[in-house]
Amino acid sequence: MRIPVHSITTKLLLLFFFVGLASVALVGFYSFYSARQAIVKRTMDQLISVRAVKKQQIEYFFAEKTRNLEFLVRSNDMKMLAEYYNKPELQGKNRLNPQPEGEPGSKEKRKSLSEASENILSYFRTYGFSNLYLLTGGSNLPDILTLDSNPGLNECPYQKLMAIRKEFVGSDPVRIYDLFKRRKNDTLPVCLMAGAISDGSGHLTGVAVLEISSSEINRIMLQNNSRIGLGQSGEAYLVGDDYLMRSESRFISHSVLNTKVNSLSARKAISSQTGAVETSDYRNIQVFSAFEPLNIPGLRWIVLVEIDYAESLVPVNRLRNDILLVSVVILIFILGLARLISKMISQPLISLKNAAVKTGMGDFNSHVDVKSTDEIGSLAGTFNTMIDRIREERERRLSAVYDGQELERQRVSRELHDGLGQKLIGAKLQMENCEGQDYPCLQKTFGEIKNVFGSLIEETRQISNDLMPPALNELGLDHALENLCSTASRQSNLEIAFSSHGLNESPDNKTIVYLYRIAQEGLNNAIRHSGAKDISMQLIENRDNLILILEDDGIGFELEQSEPGSGNGLYNMAERARILGGTLNIETGPGKGATIRVKIPRHK
């Protein structure tokens, strides 16, 4: 089905539709992207806020454990145990759960050692340590004693503890060691913290090693509650410089030291950068990610806080759907309003068009009935006025044509009646008088009748010349005008001068006839009405125009209108000049004579 785009109603509907569509689309896209940017910014701000909290919590956790260990290694109980188990007779036993009661010494000494062991065990259990190892003896072959009765020495590899003991000197602070698996299938790796034990003179007497389970770290990092700001897909987790997880994933079980995180945010954070980006996570899912390195001595860990891209933009998608729905409703409303307005605008214009078509077909009785007071109403009023003027002008032109024809007929009729008619009647009477006359009388009468017929022929030629002078086609316009002036001068007994200048090429027949009729009409008016004594006519041709000038020194007249055409004669002259594409100007006034100037372009 072809849409009639040429219809003004259709064009207005399309205009309103596309303007409305563009406006709604612009506002919709702006609202959508503004809301999207706002939600993305809010999500990033929220992730950064959670990242700061988690970073603070995990750093505080290790700082607190460091203070606990420092307090423990400075305690008299720990120094007493280290001094006791450094005795030569107790070296190299690698015992679990030492029982001071079985060791040599006084009863009071054994009681003090037992109380010290209980105090230490109570302390590290209270502060959430999984195990406590006391490394005494030399660095080459230290004694490794566990002060907890639960896990046993085999839970922490002997080589790991040996390496820690060898590293320590008396001035060493507390050291933190990264997570490691105590066994191959260990699902809860541990983190070790080691602190130096010194005697009163500052000599190293042992190293206290505390074991922290990864479950303690997971208790801080792992969040499964959707109401804390991370929704259904958000999580916070730790990653080491080997890109392996140091805290449990929300989505993958037993991920600590098993799941590798090689995302853009992880690489940036490990290279000591802080920020937030949109990237893919370790599950290859698009996420918003906030990252930052941790400031924990001995650990090159980073904290990542992430939430799925799809979940974050759920409000944006909901807003997009709402915008589309509202846009459709607005467009329907705009189309309805556009149809109403387009009809209000197009109906008067259609009426104007139909009236103009009827006028073009010759019906000058069409009127547009428009009651509005806007520009269209003014246009309709102007159109109605124009139709009335066209009708009046048409009637005037027809009247001028008919009047001109009638005057010409009257002139021809008068000349035929007064001239030819009278002479024919005289000839008839002369012939009737010949009845019964003798031959000499008849011969005389026939001679008179012969003269009458010669005069009739001459007068008939004169009438024919007036109607269409043969000199126009035979001799040209200038000779025809010169003959016209000579004949008019002879008949009116007035001085009529004619001159031509620069006429090189003969104009076309239409120009010749029209200019001749203009000159004939103007000359007749001057002879009959001006009372002039001298009349002059000039025909001038220049590069662009053909100019006819008719001047007289008569009484002049008042122009009834600003344009020529107050009478039928002048009107016909002006119309002929207009048809040739030229102009007719009249300069006159009472007692000033008259000058008629006709200018016709040569290309016509």
Image: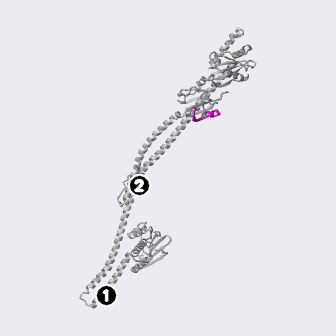
- Magenta-drawn segment: 266-282
Report the amino acid beneath label 1: Gly
Query: In the structure shown, which secondary structural element does the residue marked by tag 2 occupy?
Result: helix
Specify whether residue 453 is painted magenta: no
In space, the residues marked 1 and 2 are separated at their CA atoms by: 78 Å
Q: Is residue 472 above or below residue 2?
A: below
Query: In the structure shown, which secondary structural element does the residue marked by tag 1 occupy?
Result: helix
**First reached walking from the N terminus: tag 1 or tag 2:** 2
- Residue 53 visible in the snapshot: no
For the point 35% across and 73% down, the residue is: 408
Q: Which residue is mark 1?
A: 447
Colouring scheme, one of rainbow, by chain, secondary structure, one colour: one colour
**Is 331 in front, or is 592?**
331
Q: Is residue 554 above or below residue 217?
A: below
**Is 385 in front, or is 517?**
517
Q: Which residue is mark 2?
A: 378
- Residue 315 visible in the snapshot: yes
